[in-house]
Amino acid sequence: MTRTPAIELTGATKRFRTPSGALHTAVRDLDLTVAQGEFVAVVGPTGCGKSTTLTLVSGLEEPTEGEVRVHGEPVRGIDPRVGFVFQQDAVFPWRTVLSNVMAGPRFRGVPAAEARERAREWLGRVGLAAFEDRYPHQLSGGMRKRVALAQTFVNDPAILLMDEPFSALDVQTRALMSDQLLELWAGSGSTEDAASVVFVTHDLDEAIALADRVVVMTAGPATVKEVFTVDLPRPRTVEAVRLEPRFVELYREIWASLGEEVRITRERGAGRAA
Amino acid sequence: MPLETAPETPSAPAAEAATTTRTEARERAARNRRSMVLGARVGVLVGFLGLWELCARTNVIDPFNFSQPSRIWDQIWQWITHGTAQGSLGEQIGYTLYEALTGWVLGVIGGVLLGIALGRIRFLADVFGPYIKVLNAIPRIVLAPIFLIWFGLGPASKVASAVVLVFFPVFFNAFQGAREVDRNLVANARILGADNRRVTLQVVIPAATTWIFTSLHVSFGFALIGAIVGEYIGATKGLGLMVAAAQGTFNAAGVYAAMSILAVVALVTEGLLTYAEKKLFRWKPADAGDGR
């Protein structure tokens, strides 16, 4: 059965003009396909252009060359089927938790009563039902992240883009959040399909534990170096899957590929510093 | 520990008692400190006024030029009980406040609207940027005589000078606030489905309110200055006119008295503004909300 892939990047290149006037290539000639309902993790050295890839898919930025397609259609502006979880806190600090989660549906013209009902349902799923009247500054970092997840999932995205969403959290909270994400993802989607996910991270453990496929990027400008299929059975829990022999095997294989790029990036940094 | 002398005392309540006494002691210390500060403040004021009075009475300083606290108080009391040459004292204060408030409100509305518009729309900022810089470079207080010629002796000319003084600080803060909105918040709102209008109304404006409010404090002072200077140059009523009239009759006590009244008026309005700010910024963490 051939179905249209959820996301297709073909020969995508993105160049920026730096403040000093020089051209900086963030992404070069990138080809990547994500099937519907697939969970893809993207790993690569710091600053290699992983985040730029996500902004291209979301429509926040346009590629300089090449093409980006979502469900077969070229991306023109922001696609309403896309959800985006940011690395930094992006919840609105002047809105209460409930109002934050209601924001998406309200922006899309859903009546207030219905938006409130849907928001309450998602707050319940992320375990924040008792905190709906709080302001973000009154919550812990992990709780704010859960607000961000509810805020994104309430829009029922067919495509979910995540830019190192848990990198600011401590290790225990991060494992809990990963499990919660897998749960939400499994229960998402109005059709029979779960959302298609692109999850950018620099944490290889997290990538293998969550994803169906792990994409290794080269040192910047980013392009796909190698793709690994993670054949671990679902449903998974992060702490348990980490102990499986197959996990360790995959980790060693992928690290052999990723480690080289990390070393290149580090050497460049050292060369620049000298 | 001395608390352990009673051998059968269960340890938990003992510990509790110890902590409550310690908390009480700490509270008492904090209270003492607060009354110390307050006492010292009053002491400074009393010392300053006392020294002034003493110097004036012993002719160390010339009371005709420098006046003295008791005369200033007599002057204020006379104004309160018998009214001023221009009418009752309340009427003068009301006049000045009316001019300052009207000018302030108009200046703030103009500054916020234009600041947000130029902050959001690049084209407008590029076109109007140089003109606003030029206008800002003019010492705006010299416009007061021009406004007097244009709008006459009534309140309109004072409102105009207050507006030009208030507009610029508010405008620059609103502009900066609209420019420096966290890019993540804007990106998040756009992904969640907000159009440009909603981004402006529901992200940029709330994010810029912190900046705008900082300028409101400063700019109310400017509005008062605008009104007073306008009245000083030429008016039929108001505190500024009282200063000018007192100066014209070499009544130093009158100048100081009008200044003291003005200071009280400014402090009261400042207090009201701080109160409104606290109400509006409930979403801010308490330590960062104060801004000072």
Image: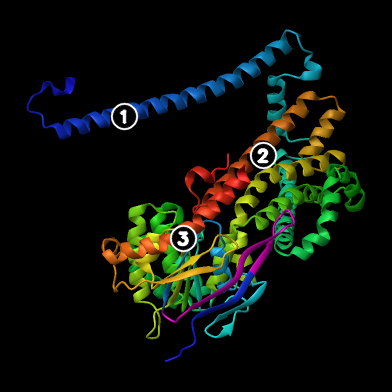
Do callouts 2 and 1 point to residues on the same chain?
A: yes
Q: Is mark 3 on a helix, strand or loop?
A: helix
What residue range appears in magenta?
A14-37
Residue A131 in percent (x, y) is at: 37, 60
All told, the count of numbered labels is: 3
**Looking at the rendered structure, which numbered label has been put on residue A258?**
3
Q: In which quarter of the image is residue B12?
A: top left
**Looking at the rendered structure, which numbered label has been put on residue B24?**
1
What amino acid is found at the position of numbered circle 3 in the picture? Leu
Q: Mark 1 lies on which chain?
A: B
- Measuring 26% from the left and 61% from the top, which residue is drawn there? A243
Q: What element carries label 1?
A: helix
Residue A63 in percent (x, y) is at: 64, 72
Mark 3 to mark 2 CA distance (whole Å): 65 Å
Q: Do the residues labelled 3 and 2 touch (CB within 8 Å)?
A: no
Mark 3 to mark 1 CA distance (whole Å): 60 Å
Q: Does the magenta stretch include residue A236?
A: no
Q: Are marks 3 and 1 in contact (CB under 8 Å)?
A: no
- Measuring 85% from the left and 50% from the top, which residue is drawn there? B135
- Measuring 52% from the left and 84% from the top, which residue is drawn there? A71
**Looking at the rendered structure, which numbered label has been put on residue A159?**
none
Residue A138 in percent (x, y) is at: 42, 52
**Rendered view: B33 above or below B109:** above
- Viewer-side label of 3, 2: 3
Mark 1 nearby-residue class (10 Å; few <14, some 14–19, many ≥20): few
The residue to which callout 2 is attached is B266
What amino acid is found at the position of numbered circle 1 in the picture? Glu
Answer left or right for A164 relative to B221. Answer: left
Q: Mark 3 lies on which chain?
A: A
